[in-house]
Image: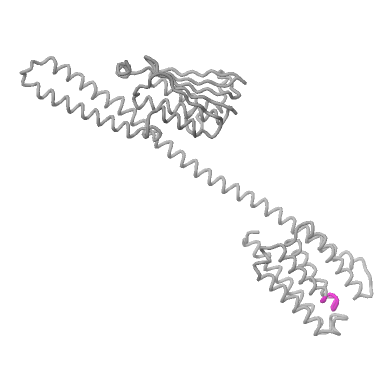
Amino acid sequence: MTRTPVTLALRLCLHALLAGLLALAAVKAVTGAGGEGAARPAAVVAAALAMAAVYAAGTLSPSVARSRRAAAWWLAALGACWLVLLALSPDGLWAAFPLYFLQLHLLPTRWALPTVLATASAAIASYLVHSSQITPGSFIGPLLGAAVAVATVRGYEALYRESERRRELIDELVATRAELAAAERTAGTLAERERLAREIHDTLAQGLSSIQLLLRAAQRALPPDSPAAPHVEQARAAAQGNLAEARRFVRALAPPDLAHGSLAAALERLSASSPGPRVRFSLSGTPAELPTPYEVALLRVAQSALANTVRHAEAGRAEITLSFMDASVTLDVVDDGRGFDPAAEPPARTGQDDGGFGLTAMRSRADSLGGTFTVESAPGQGTAVAISLPLPARTQEAAA
């Protein structure tokens, strides 16, 4: 049991109680107030000192706290000293009360209760031997003390277990809150990086590309010997260099999953690392180079759909398919899970989940790039999520 201020105070009280009771038995024997024990004061004092020495040795020994076997041997030695004191003086029976607590604390329940009962029986027997009068109190006293000790120790252990459960729950909540905060920071950072990449691509990069095309058209319209031709060429080269630099910025701001390979490779890694159902990835058509916002949108939709499958679908299999067609690119995520009613839109499936991307966010990504997003599902029939994005004109020309 962990040492706390409360347990330390209880230990000190138990030490003081046993020391006081042993001192009382010794003093009464020396002063002659201990009945038959007064006739053997030296023996009573010796037995009390021996019991105190054994008790002190046990409380200072680390093995007693660590080992049940060592604790049992210590309690046996302490009990033997107590029985000697009990045989010499009737005042020794008061030491049974702290012994109850020690036995209940150190021994397993199946041994602690019989040991406490045997200790109470020995106390009753000692009272009957040393006293000429037999009263109900001679039986009720030791048994009532044993009952109080059992109730106190068991009640404290129940409170301690409840306190430990609450402490563990608080630790878990604190750890979960820290993990959630870290996840939110990471998600916020990635979202901002993606937003910047999308803005740079949609504004700066597109503007520089248009400037380059216009300058090329102006260069073709100028006569070869025109004095403006070198300046136009210089401006076109500057626009081309800045466009390349803007595209490098966009690539640098892309998600880490896309920084070390293509979209297909990132989807394959996602399929292999899924913690839930068995996921298979397949690629259809001839892969074409996609703008970074396209790759980010498709990857995020795949991650979000697969996360929903793991959390909610209870599926055994799932499949991610990336298809390149003449004028569009399509991503399908299909599972054989329990499905749901898309019209009902349950919160668990439509709200923004831990990663911040629910069905609403997936649809918003598709709409922002001029694409379409569909969900097909029914209870007990699995779920199919599909996003289709139109290929940019230059991507279609490169693929052709």
Residue 48, image x and y in percent? 77, 78
* Residue at horizontal 79 percent and vertical 56 percent from the top: 110
Residue 289, image x and y in percent? 34, 24
Query: In the rendered view, how is the structure colored?
Result: one colour
Q: Is the stretch drawn in magenta largely helix, strand or loop?
A: helix
Q: Quadrant of the N terminus?
A: bottom right
Residue 86 is one of the magenta-drawn residues: yes
* Residue at horizontal 47 percent and vertical 20 percent from the top: 386
> Which picture quadrant has residue 37?
bottom right
Q: Quadrant of the C terminus?
A: top left
Q: Is residue 71 left or right of residue 181?
A: right
> Which picture quadrant has residue 75?
bottom right
Residue 61 is one of the magenta-drawn residues: no
> Which picture quadrant has residue 214?
top left
* Residue at horizontal 71 percent and vertical 62 percent from the top: 68
Chain part drawn in magenta: 84-90
Q: Nearer the viewer, residue 85 or 292?
A: 292
* Residue at horizontal 67 percent and vertical 54 percent from the top: 160
Residue 305, image x and y in percent? 50, 26
Q: Is residue 123 left or right of residue 294?
A: right
Above or below 255: residue 142: below
Above or below 215: residue 185: below
Q: Is residue 232 left or right of residue 125?
A: left
Count of number-bearing discs: 0
Residue 112, image x and y in percent? 78, 60
